[in-house]
């Protein structure tokens, strides 16, 4: 494998055929993997030396609990791992983690969502089923129920993606999420999809075919509405927040364990107790991510850390007990803020030190 192909891949200029050939070559031997890592380091160094610069970041507003609102404007150097955001895979001695949005078709074929051009998505028979764009896939058509085939879209940390399903439903997938859905819905029965992670749904109305989101141990049933579902596997809860219309959350194993939501309410399923609770909320906090923002209200730092990890594709290790007990309120623009910006702002209220090694951030007590 020539260095030219590796450089094209790292610059996001390689074709799908070249990318696949590169992956096959890397997996063929440890020596190939070492050569790839060595070449990537050289490329990263030369790229950063010429391109990395200080940028002025717009105001980021964060209001720590029980303190005066702070408005800051300052310059910051963006982190190295953000500058290298075009990389599909992060290689190390322990694991290989996919860093590109991946679509698994019903016949097992994998499609990598990359490039800037519109392309056609075909099934195993060569039929056109969807159009694929850099930030969205649009499906269309219906089939007989016995022909329903499921696709699975997986979005890694650090990215988001949008789907328009064949019934017209629009789904926005957050970082670290996957959705299993019919490439074309059937003519009869429910419209079933399966979510791991977080998604915002704008469901097309169809009284004859209820839309059902299966998330962990619960089903969320709707006819036509806008709502958010958060069902990350590492969390002990599943939250569904309703913006418009009406939905119901029920236990998959016991449909009689059910609750009906009205707009501006959130239902929470507890994995351990198998109970569903309901409360009124500010729904804008739970849909802000679809607009490229992170919004918090009296949110514990432990929760904020998880969100930052998924949004920016980093690992945060917090060894500061004071910070762990602190709650924060504020809004952050994702595209205009780096992890460094956010941490530097938070530490103004609760002092702490942090160090960055590759993609791991360690937070410690101030010296």
Image (cartoon, rainbow, N blue to C red):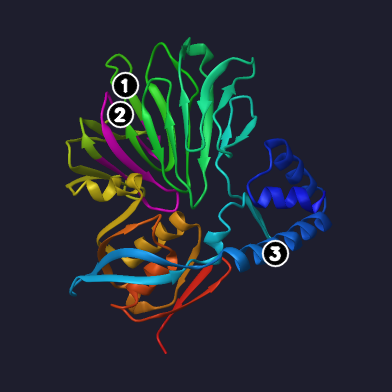
Q: CA distance from mark 2 to mark 1?
A: 7 Å
Residue nearest the observer in this picture, 268 or 95: 95
Q: Position of residue 218 (x, y in %)?
A: 35, 37
Do tag 2 and tag 3 residues touch (Cβ < 8 Å)? no
Q: Residue furthest bottom?
A: 367
Instruction: Give the residue pinned by disc 1.
Output: 210
Ranked by sequence position, the earlier of labels 2 and 3 is 3
- The quarter holding residue 238 reads top left
State if disc 1 and disc 2 touch (CB < 8 Å): yes
- Which labelled disc corresponds to residue 155? none
Local secondary structure at mark 1: loop
The vertical placement of 151 against 124, above or below, is: below
Query: In the image, is 261 to the left or to the right of 149?
Result: left
Residues rendered magenta in the picture: 213-241
- Residue 272 appears at what percent x and percent y? 36, 50
Gap between marks 1 and 3, in whole Å? Answer: 51 Å
């Amino acid at each position: 494998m020539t260095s030219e192909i590796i450089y094209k891949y790292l610059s996001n200029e390689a074709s799908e055929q070249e990318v696949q050939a590169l992956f096959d070559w890397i997996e063929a031997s440890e020596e190939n993997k070492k050569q790839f890592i060595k070449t990537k380091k050289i490329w990263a160094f030369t790229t950063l030396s010429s391109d990395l610069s200080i940028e002025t970041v717009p105001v980021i507003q964060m209001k720590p609990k029980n303190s005066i609102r702070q408005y800051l404007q300052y310059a910051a150097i963006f982190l190295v791992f953000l500058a290298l955001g075009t990389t599909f895979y992060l290689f190390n001695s322990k694991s290989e983690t996919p860093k590109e949005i991946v679509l698994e078709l019903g016949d097992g074929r994998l499609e990598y969502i990359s490039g800037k051009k519109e392309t056609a998505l075909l099934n195993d028979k060569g039929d056109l089923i969807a159009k694929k764009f850099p930030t969205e896939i649009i499906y269309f058509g219906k089939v007989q129920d016995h022909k329903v085939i499921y696709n699975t879209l997986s979005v890694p940390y650090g990215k988001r993606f949008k789907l328009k399903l064949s019934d017209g439903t629009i789904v926005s997938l957050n970082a670290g999420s996957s959705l299993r859905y019919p490439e074309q819905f059937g003519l009869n029965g429910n419209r079933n999809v399966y979510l791991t992670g977080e998604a915002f749904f704008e469901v097309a109305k169809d009284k004859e075919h209820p839309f059902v989101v299966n998330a962990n141990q619960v089903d969320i049933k709707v006819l036509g509405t806008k709502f958010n579902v958060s069902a990350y596997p590492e969390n002990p809860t599943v939250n569904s927040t309703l913006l418009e219309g009406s939905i119901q959350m029920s236990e998959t194993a016991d449909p009689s364990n059910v609750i009906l939501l009205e707009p501006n309410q959130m239902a929470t399923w507890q994995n351990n107790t198998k109970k569903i609770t309901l409360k009124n909320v500010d729904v804008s906090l739970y849909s802000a991510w679809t607009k490229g923002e992170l919004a918090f209200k009296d949110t514990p730092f432990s929760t904020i850390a998880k969100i930052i990890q998924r949004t920016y594709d980093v690992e945060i290790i917090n060894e500061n007990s004071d910070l762990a007990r602190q709650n924060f309120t504020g809004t952050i623009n994702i595209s205009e803020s780096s992890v460094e910006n956010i941490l530097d702002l938070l530490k103004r209220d609760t002092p702490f030190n942090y160090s960055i090694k590759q993609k791991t951030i360690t937070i410690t007590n101030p010296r």
